[in-house]
């Protein structure tokens, strides 16, 4: 036998030999840090006492809202269709109440609301405006009026139309 020591060669791999683990996208550590950051941001409120607080009317608000809707109708029809049923109402001297029909529509409104309210505050020179959101799904549903519904409204006003329908068998589909 050969008594010479054998040389052992160690090679290092340039890439890991096992697959890289894929994270689920949720990390408890990042979630806790995110909550702490949000709390810090909330504490930094803008003081509006030194900013202008001019009077604005309901008409000013409605004119700007309708202008925004016209611009969105051509620029972004998806957002327009989502928010066209919203109602903006001047609730107080420095408060606007936004009535919205659904949460999904509110999500679309949130994308443009910052830009709209900043523009409105600059236009009326009132930087103390506060916005309150309220879900109002009863009054804001857009009802599709069919021929049958129109006929039923007319029957309420004139019951003789019901006799006419029985006689002639109108096709109201």
Image (cartoon, helix red, strand yellow):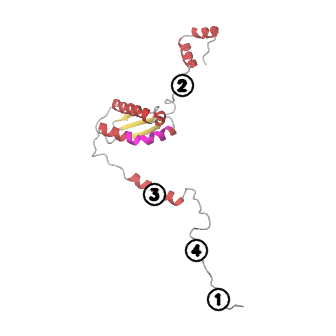
Identify the residue at horizontal 39%, vertical 42% (top origin): 114
Identify the residue at horizontal 59%, vertical 76% (top origin): 11
Query: Real-space Cα distance between discs 4 and 3?
Result: 42 Å
Query: Real-space Cα distance between discs 1 and 2?
Result: 92 Å
Query: Real-space Cα distance between discs 2 and 3?
Result: 47 Å
Is residue 160 shown left or right of residue 57? right
Disc 4 marks which residue?
Answer: 12
Looking at the rendered image, the quarter that the C terminus falls into is top right
Please report the bounds of the magenta region as a residue range.
Answer: 105-116
- Residue 26, picture quadrant: bottom right
- Residue 164, picture quadrant: top right
Contact between marks 1 and 2 (CB within 8 A): the answer is no
* Viewer-side label of 3, 1: 1
Give x and y (percent) for residue 9: 61, 80
Q: Is residue 61 magenta?
A: no
Is residue 48 shown left or right of residue 26? left
Dot 1 alpha-carbon crowd within 10 angstroms: few under 14, some 14 to 19, many 20 or more: few
Give x and y (percent) for residue 64: 36, 33
Contact between marks 2 and 4 (CB within 8 A): the answer is no
Residue 5 shows which numbered tag?
A: 1
Identify the residue at horizontal 38%, vertical 39% (top origin): 116
Give x and y (percent) for residue 48: 31, 46
Please report whichever mark, 1 or 2, sits nearer to the chain's N-terminal start: 1
* Viewer-side label of 2, 4: 4
Q: Spot the residue most to the front.
A: 2
* Viewer-side label of 4, 3: 4
């Amino acid at each position: 036998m050969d008594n010479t020591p054998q040389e052992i060669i160690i090679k290092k791999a340039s890439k890991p030999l096992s697959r890289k683990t894929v994270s689920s996208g949720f990390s408890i550590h990042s979630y806790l840090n995110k909550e702490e950051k949000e709390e810090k941001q909330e504490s930094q409120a803008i003081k509006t006492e030194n900013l202008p607080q001019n009077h604005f009317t309901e008409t000013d608000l409605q004119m700007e809202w309708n202008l925004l809707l016209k611009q969105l109708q051509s620029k972004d029809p998806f957002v327009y269709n989502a928010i066209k049923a919203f109602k903006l109402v001047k609730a107080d001297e420095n408060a606007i109440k936004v009535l919205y029909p659904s949460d999904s529509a509110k999500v679309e409104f949130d994308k443009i609301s910052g830009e709209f309210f900043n523009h409105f505050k600059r236009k009326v020179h009132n930087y103390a405006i506060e916005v309150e959101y309220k879900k109002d799904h009863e009054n804001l549903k857009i009802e599709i009026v069919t021929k049958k519904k129109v006929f039923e409204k007319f029957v309420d006003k004139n019951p003789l139309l019901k006799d006419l329908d029985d006689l002639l068998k109108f096709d109201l589909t």
